[in-house]
Amino acid sequence: MTNMRTPRLTVPAAAIIGLTAWVAGILAQATPQSFANAPAGFDVRRPGIEAGRVERIEYPSSVTNTKRPAIVYLPPGYSSARKYPVLYLLHGIGGNEKHWTQFGVADAILDNLIAEKKAVPMIIVMPHGRASNEPETNLFAGRGRPGQARDGGAPPPVAGRAGGGPNGAMAVEFQAYAAFERELIADLIPYIESHYAAQSSREQRALAGLSMGGGQSLNFGLANLNTFAWVGGFSSAPNTAQPAQLLKDPAAARAQLKLLWVSCGDQDSLFNISENVHKYLDEQKVPHIWHIDAGGAHTFPVWKNDLYHFSSLLFR
């Protein structure tokens, strides 16, 4: 009787390594690069550490032909003897220049990170991102007043999809927030760089925001890669352009971006907007961080956590 043996299949080591790398690559694309929640107390001002300085400015706008406000955070030990990178940080619809310090405690978060050497000392500019002389619509009446603002000033989710054409009062707001792009590039950035010890290269400039400000940041940042190398959208709103419009030149984005951050809470009704941006970036092989805030809704606890992680990655 002939002994029939099953032939042994020998797989070269190089092939195994290649297969492992391929599988790891697929998993890396499919699995969100989620960060753990920031540690307890990350957003509480701590005694005994040096605090930065927060001041209000007004700068001339060529869009509205008026003086426009912004809040500027200067890091602990700020000195005109050195130059600092700058993060432009935008609020949501119905918000204003005070929201990131009033409800998002951005100054306390950065003070703590800088004291722990987890963030590079940076200037943060928090402008009023609605560039219009038209009265604000009453969609968000009462916003910004403690005790009346939902979730500590967080604008409520607006139903819709990225690039979905708004109508009526919402269209007025979309236009006013879109117009801020011209003001940001032509007026605010030159003002900051002429009045503060700010770095002026694109590699030392970041743009991020929440909700409507997240949409602005993705729209403006990706359209102005010669101005911003670091871009972040937190729970971006329906003003976010459709992904193919948002990223017209994937090769330029791959070459010029230092960091592209896209995040949203998984309980946010606007989750599909950020998720669709992430999927398109994956298709175009544009490196980015896709962070899902587990259990997170459209609220400031989510955005504070995003700021904690995003700012710790900047300018490195």
Image (cartoon, rainbow, N blue to C red):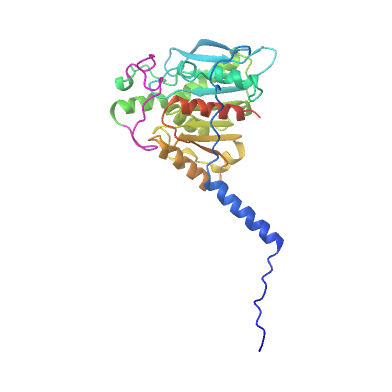
Residue 161 located within the stretch drawn in magenta? yes
Q: Quadrant of the C terminus?
A: top right
Q: Is residue 147 above or below residue 269?
A: above
Q: Give above or below for 64 relative to 7.
A: above
Number of marks drawn? 0
Report the residue that reaches farthest toward the front: 1
Q: Nearer the viewer, residue 75 or 306?
A: 306
Residue 26 placement (x, y as % from top left): 56, 51
Q: Nearer the viewer, residue 43 or 89?
A: 43
Instruction: Judge left or right: residue 179 versus residue 232.
Output: left
Tell me which corner region of the image, top left, top right, bottom left or bottom right, holds residue 4: bottom right
Q: Quadrant of residue 111?
A: top right
Dominant secondary-structure state across the stretch colored magenta:
loop
Magenta span has 38? Answer: no
Quadrant for the N terminus, please: bottom right
| Residue 186 x %, y % | 51, 21
Residue 166 located left or right of residue 71: left
Q: Position of residue 207 (x, y in %)?
A: 53, 27
In this picture, residue 123 sits left or right of residue 267: right
Q: Position of residue 50 (x, y in %)?
A: 63, 12
The magenta region covers 141-166
The image shows residue 2, relative to residue 164, as above or below, that is below
In which quarter of the view is residue 99 placed? Answer: top left
Residue at image position (43%, 29%) is 211
Q: Residue furthest bottom?
A: 1
